[in-house]
Amino acid sequence: MNQRSVLITGAGSGIGLATTELLLLAGWHVLATDRDQAALDRLAERLDNKSDRLILRHMDVTDPDAVAKVALECQALTAPLLALVNSAGIGSSVRFADTTPDMLRRIYEINVIGAFALSQALAPVLRDNGGGSIVHIASVSGLKGNMGRSAYGASKGALVTLTKIMAVELADDLIRVNAIAPGPVETPMVADTHTAVTRQEWHRTVPMRRYGTPDEIASAIAFLVDGRQSSYVTGQILAVDGGFTAAGIMA
């Protein structure tokens, strides 16, 4: 367990970046992937002192050839692959009437099919290494009918269901599958899509009256990937949302 690797997608920013940093501190070997080469370059500079346990790979989760190449590399890692964190994703805030089929397809391609394809490619590697953990990054928008999230929320809802099915089907291979459902989190994607009005509404409906941080999401991911801490946890959707999904009428 002291020699273990994790593959993290979307590792160049936001939740993926925070998870990369935290798991490196916890002693993991990290294969960090992102489709943004500039983000990977910044990550390399930021984490240079941990480079002996960090491998950076440019990968688009929608590219089958790139996924297959990374999966092949994972078979030969010195520290066996024991976890996958599917953090790569895109979002949108567009009302249902204005959402086009192309918008929906694009979001599904990355958020759902990308996570599905990489998980399918790496599940045999995890199985052959004695089992492991897969964590999807879903969203409270996959659990609640949040306004403007018809495409994004539908993709995250699909991940929620996929998580449960994978957990059932991969249990015999000793692979646990769970998902994190973040509430509003201060990430670059949120900075691009949340207006002042959007922020006001989140502050009004989140009992803790604030956005979360990527580090707070990363700590929950670290729990789920670590077989010493969460060995009997599978098929679960852990909302890390400041109480949003629990709230009803609020003052």
Image (cartoon, rainbow, N blue to C red):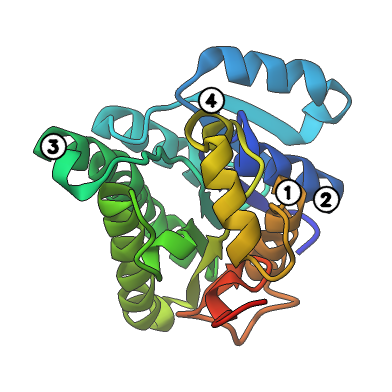
Identity of the residue drawn at 57% across and 59% down: 182
Q: Is residue 120 visible?
A: no
Amino acid of disc 4: Arg
The answer to whether the residues at label 3 and label 4 have Cβ atoms under 8 Å apart is no
In this picture, residue 98 sits left or right of residue 163 = left
- The mark lying in front, picked from 2 and 3, is 3
Q: State the residue position of label 4.
A: 57
Q: Is residue 49 visible?
A: yes
Q: State the residue position of label 2.
A: 27
**Whole-number angstrom distance, CA of label 1 to CA of label 4:** 25 Å
Q: Earlier in the sequence, mark 1 or mark 4?
A: 4
Q: Is residue 130 above or below residue 53?
A: below
Identity of the residue drawn at 84% across and 31% down: 50
The disc at residue 213 is 1
Mark 2 burial class by Cα count in 10 Å: few <14, some 14-19, many 20+ = some
- Secondary structure of residue under mark 4: strand
Measured as percent of width and height from the top left, residue 88 is found at 46, 40
